Image (cartoon, rainbow, N blue to C red):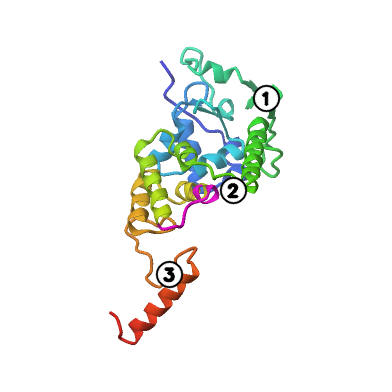
Amino acid sequence: MMANKRMFSVDVVETDAFLDLPPKTQALYFHLGMRADDDGFVSSPRTIVRTIGCTTGDLKQLEAAGYVISFSSGVLVVTDWKVNNTLKSDRYRKTMFQNELALLKESASKRYILSDNGTISEPIRNQNGNQQEPQYSIVKDSVEKCRLEQESNAAVAAGEPDTPPADIFTTFADGDGELLQALQDYDRMRKEKRKSLTDTMRRSLCQQLDEEFHRCEWVQIIKQATRQGWLKFYPLDKDKPASTVPEFESAGDQISRIINDLKRKNGVIE
């Protein structure tokens, strides 16, 4: 049976480094710590993020600060787990994530760090929080990201067609069919308005959803923008001010808008 009590060390949570994190990010750390198994692994971090009203941005801050390590399988581990918790052997139950555990080793200060396998730069986080040295950096992923960006830029320079929206939106939807459909409908609406999305715009919209809105609202927010013909996303039930000039307004649209405004002021049209 897995132990059902979890602890947090003041050596971790009362440092300047931790207390400088936003309150929501700190709260997420405690929730992850409470739900971790006896080796510090959390099987469904994204579900926890959504459940407590945080965003993946909060999770990314924890990872960037070195408090968690995420794996490609979707699980994560709390790096200070063994600093926070000491379990009796008769209460300990080993993690089911043995493949991920095999990628880790324990530092002299009892922190999980990624093994030296040629793709990882090891972090060192000072205990007093006054200085933070290089954080976790997955070099392989960074190189791959850079390569993809270079290829994308080269394709644009060569006049190649933009990446299909499904490639970006499908990745963002992560298996959520309803979310993907809403994104594709919005993309179609933009094309019909002759204000088609570029890859940069698609990524920006996905980032806006992730950072500004709760996951449970995404579909309705996208549908609202599609229905209203908006060029970005707004909170639910919040109408855009009538005086707001649409983004990317063409010269023709701008002239028509000004003429109509003048007609209304002069009582020509209502």
Disc 3 packing (10 Å; few <14; some 14–19; many ≥20): few
| Residue occupied by mark 1 | 107
Question: Tag 3: residue type?
Answer: Thr
Q: Position of residue 89 (x, y in %)?
A: 51, 13
Q: Position of residue 205 (x, y in %)?
A: 48, 50
- Measure the alpha-carbon separation of dots 1 and 3: 55 Å
| Residue occupied by mark 2 | 20
Give the extent of the magenta segment.
193-202
Label placed on residue 144? none
In the depicted structure, whether residue 24 falls above or below residue 140: below
Task: Specify the quadrant of the image occupied by residue 253.
Answer: bottom left
Query: Mark 2 or mark 1, which has the lower sequence index?
Result: 2
Q: Position of residue 104 (x, y in %)?
A: 62, 22
- Measure the alpha-carbon separation of dots 2 and 1: 24 Å
Relative depth, front residue between 150 and 130: 150
Disc 1 packing (10 Å; few <14; some 14–19; many ≥20): few
Q: Quadrant of the C terminus?
A: bottom left
Relative depth, front residue between 67 and 109: 67
Query: Mark 1 or mark 3, which has the lower sequence index?
Result: 1
Relative depth, front residue between 147 and 116: 147
The residue drawn where x is 50% and y is 70% is 251
Task: Specify the quadrant of the image occupied by residue 122.
Answer: top right
